[in-house]
Image: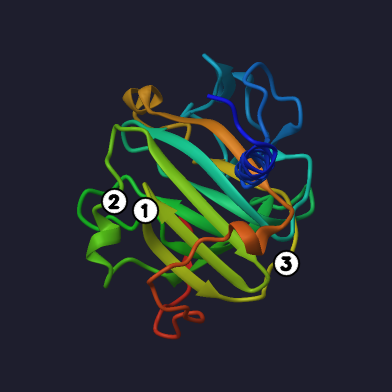
Amino acid sequence: MKLRLPQCILLLATTLTAVSAEPPWRSLFNGRDLTGWKIVGPATKASAVVENGELVGHMIRGTPEHTFFCTDEKFGDFILEVDCYQTGGFNTGVLIRCIDTPTTASVRLHGYQMKVDPSTTRQWTGGIFDDYGKNWLWLQTLAANDRGRTAYKFNEWARFRIEALGRVIKIWVNGIPTAHLLDDKYTRGPIAFKIHSFPAAGNVEHEKNLIRWKNIRILTTDLARYAQPMDLPALPRDPTQTVLPKP
């Protein structure tokens, strides 16, 4: 079947529109080594490695509070997507817009942290708290979000999406909305994945616990176009939450 010239032009325009609609994602991890990343905190090589194209954190006894995979690059507004697989009781999270503290500080990064929760009772994966120094403060929990609490499946790959546009932070877990925060304390900084502390006297069996990250990609341009609507209300910090000291 031959197409007339106007039909060809229309088909070409439609094709170009479809191609241009694809978000310009940029990979943050090459799957081979830690190029573009650094380990923040005195981690050993055994506690943070690359395996099978994945960033892998191991709970090794003696890992201090806290150790992180951290990007060299800093980001202000962005949309981030990443896959995560958690085994055992590995307590972890994604920090965004991090502030680097002095090298003498016991906790080297502060920022917003999206929680990856190993709990089978609380189930607050996708919630967000202010992680700073020796304390943390929950900004949005999932206590009233039953749909969000069941979005994360333990011992399965999960897809996280974090949108940080100005003071608006939105989080999805496996496509289900879990947090919609209005806050402006942190505005720009690296992205980091936490490797939780493990005391030297801890149970050696816990060294089998792993956290795996892959398919790490980011958008930094034309964000309003690619931002997704969310049916959770946008809320400021929860004033009922109290500051909790870290152990």
Left or right position of 182 against 116:
right
| Secondary structure type for disc 2 | loop
Q: Which residue is mark 3?
A: 187
Vertical position of residue 117 compared to residue 44: above or below: below
Q: Position of residue 228 (x, y in %)?
A: 51, 61
Q: Which residue is mark 1?
A: 125
**Dot 3, crowdedness within 10 Å: few (<14), some or many (≥20)?**
some
Residue 71 visible to the viewer: yes
Circle on res. 24: none
N-terminal of the pair, mark 2 or mark 3, is: 2
N-terminal of the pair, mark 3 or mark 1, is: 1
Q: Position of residue 101 (x, y in %)?
A: 75, 55
Residue 230 placement: quadrant: bottom left
Q: Which residue is mark 2?
A: 151
Q: Are marks 1 and 2 in contact (CB under 8 Å)?
A: yes
Q: CA distance from mark 2 to mark 3?
A: 28 Å
Say which quadrant the C terminus sits in: bottom left
Q: Position of residue 71 (x, y in %)?
A: 72, 40
| Secondary structure type for disc 1 | loop
**Dot 2, crowdedness within 10 Å: few (<14), some or many (≥20)?**
many
Q: CA distance from mark 3 to mark 1?
A: 23 Å
Report the residue at 63% width, 30% height from top: 43
Q: Depth check: 216 or 49 in front? A: 216
Residue 85 placement: quadrant: top left
Report the residue at 65% width, 16% height from top: 32
Residue 111 visible to the viewer: no
